Image (tube, helix red, strand yellow):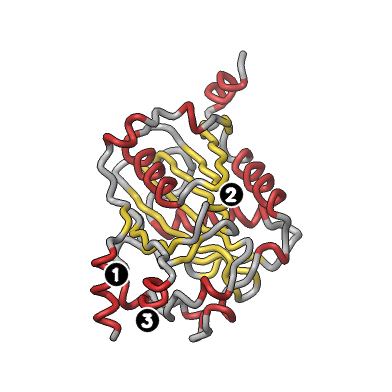
């Protein structure tokens, strides 16, 4: 019997793993959205960095309240509104993305609501960072001590859910300067600015080791099947109407006027 057959016989859920390197974040988010809404498989996508800096906002975020618009315009930083909720993040080649897309019955005893999914993911990543650092899930963030290194976003449909994380393996101060202090922030932040609030994963774990530990932790919950990006039916990407989109220059200019 094949490994796939044994997994099915044992009732272990299958998960397809796609490892990426440097995929543009807009392309990644659109792939995630399509897999959530048009596939019936469980997926894990790991993208080791994105090709160039970008700002990614949650579905309902207001640009003028979350981003320093004039520097963004000056530096030609693209702004993306993703299909999930959550906060605003600046991403680049030093951001590692891990996305889990699951059927509602794939994870035993986890109800398809934000808090149970978040709690389950916190336990999953506690295995990844075991013995390395003071890891915690605080409110909706992954932290070492009281400093954030991973921001999360979710979306839940009738039969499926997605949980995706942007991990700050490293970051530059310039990137942090594009973000305003949000009016709605977790209590543990205590009005700290970005440089005092976030920390770098590279101070705790090598990049490749984090990815391998993550795959191992997921492998304890699922029967993981590595597949290539090319094996996914890419042709249907263009046919699917995505809600994830790049904001236009006009939208950013209008937000700049509001901030003035």
The spot of residue 182 in percent (x, y) is 40, 78
The spot of residue 222 in percent (x, y) is 56, 36
Of the image marks 2 and 3, the number of the one nearer the N terminus? 2
Residue lying farthest to the right in this orientation: 131
> Alpha carbon of mark 2 to alpha carbon of mark 3: how far?
31 Å
Judging by the rendered image, the residue that carries numbered circle 3 is 183
Q: Residue at x 57, y 70 (%)?
A: 148
Q: Mark 2 or mark 3, which is nearer to you?
A: 2
Tell me the quarter of the picture where residue 78 sits.
bottom left
Of the image marks 1 and 3, the number of the one nearer the N terminus? 3
Of the image marks 1 and 2, the number of the one nearer the N terminus? 2
Q: Pick whichever, 249 or 45, lies toward us.
A: 249
Judging by the rendered image, the residue that carries numbered circle 2 is 48
Tell me the quarter of the picture where residue 54 sits.
bottom left
The spot of residue 1 in percent (x, y) is 62, 13
The image's mark for residue 81 is none
Q: Residue at x 47, y 46 (%)?
A: 109
Element at label 3: loop
Q: Pick whichever, 253 or 107, lies toward us.
A: 253
The image's mark for residue 252 is 1
Crowding near the residue tagged with mark 1, few <14, some 14–19, many ≥20 C-alpha atoms within 10 Å: many
């Amino acid at each position: 019997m094949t490994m796939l057959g044994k997994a099915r016989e044992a009732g272990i859920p299958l998960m397809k793993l796609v490892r990426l390197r440097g995929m543009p974040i807009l392309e990644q988010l659109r792939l995630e959205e399509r897999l959530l809404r048009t596939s019936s498989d469980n997926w894990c996508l790991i993208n080791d960095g994105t090709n160039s800096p970008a700002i990614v906002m949650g579905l309902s975020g207001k640009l003028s309240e979350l981003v320093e618009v004039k520097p963004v315009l000056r530096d030609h930083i693209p702004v993306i509104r993703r299909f999930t909720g959550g906060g605003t993040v600046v991403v680049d080649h030093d951001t590692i993305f891990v996305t889990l897309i699951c059927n509602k019955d794939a994870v035993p005893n986890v109800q398809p609501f934000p808090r149970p999914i978040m709690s389950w993911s916190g336990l999953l990543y506690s295995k990844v960072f075991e013995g390395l650092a003071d890891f915690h899930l605080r409110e909706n963030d992954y932290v070492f001590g009281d400093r954030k290194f991973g921001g999360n976003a979710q979306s839940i449909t009738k039969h499926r859910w997605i949980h995706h994380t942007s991990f700050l393996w490293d970051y530059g101060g310039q990137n942090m300067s594009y973000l305003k202090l949000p009016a709605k922030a977790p209590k543990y932040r205590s009005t700290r600015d970005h440089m005092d609030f976030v920390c770098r994963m590279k101070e705790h774990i090598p990049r490749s080791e984090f990815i391998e530990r993550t795959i191992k932790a997921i492998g304890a919950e699922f029967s993981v099947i590595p597949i290539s990006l090319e094996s996914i039916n890419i042709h249907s990407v263009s046919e699917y109407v995505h809600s994830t989109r790049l904001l236009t220059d006009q939208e950013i200019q209008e937000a700049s006027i509001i901030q003035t």
